[in-house]
Image (cartoon, helix red, strand yellow):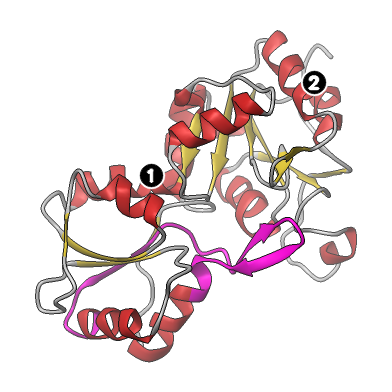
Amino acid sequence: MNKPHGIIFDLDGTVYRGEQLIPGARETIERVRASAHPLAFVTNAIETVTEHVEKLTRLGIPVHPDEIITSALVLVQHLRGEMPHARLFALADPPLLEQLAPYFRFSEDPDEIDVVIASTDRAFDYRKLAIGFHALRRGARFWATNADATWPLPGGEIPDAGAIIGALEGCTNRRVEVVAGKPSQLVVQLALECLGRAACECLVVGDSLYSDIAMGQRAGMQTALVLTGETRRKDLAQSAIKPDIVLESIEEVPGLLSGD
């Protein structure tokens, strides 16, 4: 593969798992910075940029807020640009609601709702499903932070935004219209602005075939799959999505960079 210049790192499963750094992650980030390669951390998690900065700093990887791109950040920015006066119904955990609240009104009246937003929602129930159902049936837009089926946690996985999307699609005969996070073009555009590089100059490093690697391939980036997260080597044979290179972990990334 060609020597990349800008680097996009996934976070959970690539840089850390839960509250534990992947071995070699700190040293890899330090070497990338020392070699003057611009980098960005792109995640489908909905916690705030500040929370991600604090977590990475606590784990020994100081970062600047401008280097963090979350699906929630992309969603809020896109929604403010496209529908700044929209009334929302968000099936979401508190971190997303808190990021939307300064800019938008919320409603649980299907006749008032302009956009139904699907996200990670650990308080999802039939009442919320029914509100979303009626709003979508009445013509509300259908957006999502991300479409990941599951969310990795230490000790296992839990349903992610893809499960909420599936529930709404299953009862409304509607399909989600906008997905803000990986692998969408919306998050790619923001990442490339952060890096100041063209897509063909960039490398995506991540543990998910269906978000990280798919995003990179669609955008024309090089892709490196790490085996420290959700994907195992045996999964590659069953997937139509093939990375350019497979790495055991993030600690092998410096060997891919120009000048190393």
Label at residue 27: 2
Q: Residue at x 55, y 39 (%)?
A: 42
| Cα distance in 3D space between marks 2 and 1 | 29 Å
Mark 1 neighbour density, 10 Å: few (under 14) some (14–19) many (20 or more): many
- Residue 60 spot, x, y in % from top left: 69, 22
Between 39 and 214, which is closer to the camera in this rendering? 39
Q: Nearer the viewer, mark 2 or mark 1?
A: 2
Between 8 and 214, which is closer to the camera in this rendering? 8
Q: Residue at x 29, y 86 (%)?
A: 130
Q: What amino acid type is highlighted by mark number 2?
A: Glu
Secondary element at tag 1: helix
Figure quadrant of residue 105: bottom left
Q: Is residue 191 visible?
A: no
- 193 vs 34, left or right, is left
When the figure is inspected, residue 115 is found, relative to residue 216, above or below; the finding is: below
- Mark 1 sits on what residue? 74
- 124 vs 230, left or right, is left
Q: Is residue 253 visible?
A: yes
The magenta-colored residue range is 136-163
Q: Residue at x 18, y 78 (%)?
A: 139
- Residue 67 spot, x, y in % from top left: 51, 26
The answer to if 160 sits in the magenta stretch is yes
- Residue 14 spot, x, y in % from top left: 73, 42
- Residue 51 spot, x, y in % from top left: 49, 36
